[in-house]
Amino acid sequence: MRTSLIIVFALLGIIGCKQTEQPVEKAPVKFQHVVDSGPKPWTSETFETTEDDFTFGIISDLNGGEREGVYATAVEQLNMLDPTFVLSVGDLIDGGTEDTLQLKKEWDSFEERTAKLNMPFFHLGGNHDLTNPVMREFWKNRFGPRYYHFIYEDVLFLMMDSEDYEEERMMEIYTARAKALKIISGEIEGKYEESEYYNMPERSIGGMSKEQLDYFTKVLENNTDVKWTFVLMHKPLWMREDEKGLGPLEDVLADRDYTVINGHFHSFSNQIRKGHSYTILGTTGGSQNPKDSMAFDHVSLVRMAKKPVITHLKMEGILTEQGVVPGKK
């Protein structure tokens, strides 16, 4: 019995030695070549180390005169570019009605096209999506909150509602807007530039309630250590200088890294404000002024590494393997 045990332990020892002597797998060599001496036809053999990053996409205004087929093409292009998720800055439907059947038809159309994305999509409302209390309720029943936040990979996203008015003021804007549209269409006489709606500040820069301000103030206070903060909205609340604008929230944002992005004007621009990047996107299917060189269809890609690298891609330049814009022959 003792001899048998000695043999067993000896065998285990041999096996153990063999296991420890197994060669350790080496990491694969990333860059290999056979030019061993003399000049080399490349500039460097020092490559960027792999970073923990991700990329997300952004679409801009579809509406305010949607042009057929543009958004469907953008969906195909975004699938080719393969971001982790896609954000919007509003004006996703034509809207501007209290007819719930018409609203369902328009949202069904938008959702049918959006469902072809291979990644998550985050809704955000614009003036076309949230024109009146009926549309607010429709949004609530279909998409939930009008403003919200989320965190992905230590990056904070504030998704704001720039149509956040008291109901009485919302109806005043809605009524004035309906009359202005009749002037534009020639249904009634008048000049659009002299209409009540044209001269309302909310037409261009929107508004935000104290409740929304308090919500995002608390979000920022509870998330002080995130790597970066993105603030998205439809209308440029940052252009409004009273308490219903972005100013009070900018004070809370002041000591952190952040980027602001909005739509609404259908014309691309970028500026540095208070030391931070503020971008107004062009369109992803909305109407365009042919005299405006910055009115173009595009999608935006943001690669989030240590800081964001933002690239705006004109849709006419995103081509398939065959060298054509997706959907076009």
Image (cartoon, rainbow, N blue to C red):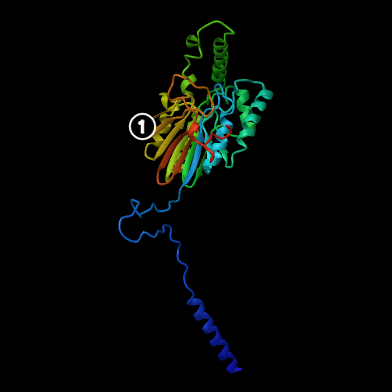
Res. 125 visible in picture: yes
Q: Is residue 44 above or below residue 18?
A: above
Q: How many marks?
A: 1
Res. 148 visible in picture: no
Question: Which residue ends up furthest to the right in the rendered image?
Answer: 101
Q: Position of residue 34 (x, y in %)?
A: 39, 60
Question: Which residue ends up furthest to the top in the rendered image?
Answer: 189
Count neighbours of disc 1 (C-alpha within 10 A) and say few if under 14, some if 14 to 19, many if 20 or more.
Answer: few
Q: Position of residue 293 (x, y in %)?
A: 42, 23
Who's the residue at 43% across and 58% down the image?
30
Question: Which residue ends up furthest to the left in the rendered image?
Answer: 38
Q: Is residue 282 above or below residue 257?
A: above
Foreground of the two, 70 or 187: 70
Who's the residue at 46% across and 18% down the image?
201
Left or right placement of residue 42 versus residue 201 in this view = left
Q: Position of residue 60 (x, y in %)?
A: 51, 30
Which residue corresponds to mark 1? 272
Element assignment for label 1: strand
Quadrant assignment for the N terminus: bottom right
Looking at the rendered structure, the kind of residue marked 1 is Ile
Who's the residue at 30% across and 55% down the image?
39
Foreground of the two, 40 or 43: 40
Quadrant assignment for the C terminus: top right
Q: Position of residue 224 (x, y in %)?
A: 42, 43
Foreground of the two, 38 or 82: 38
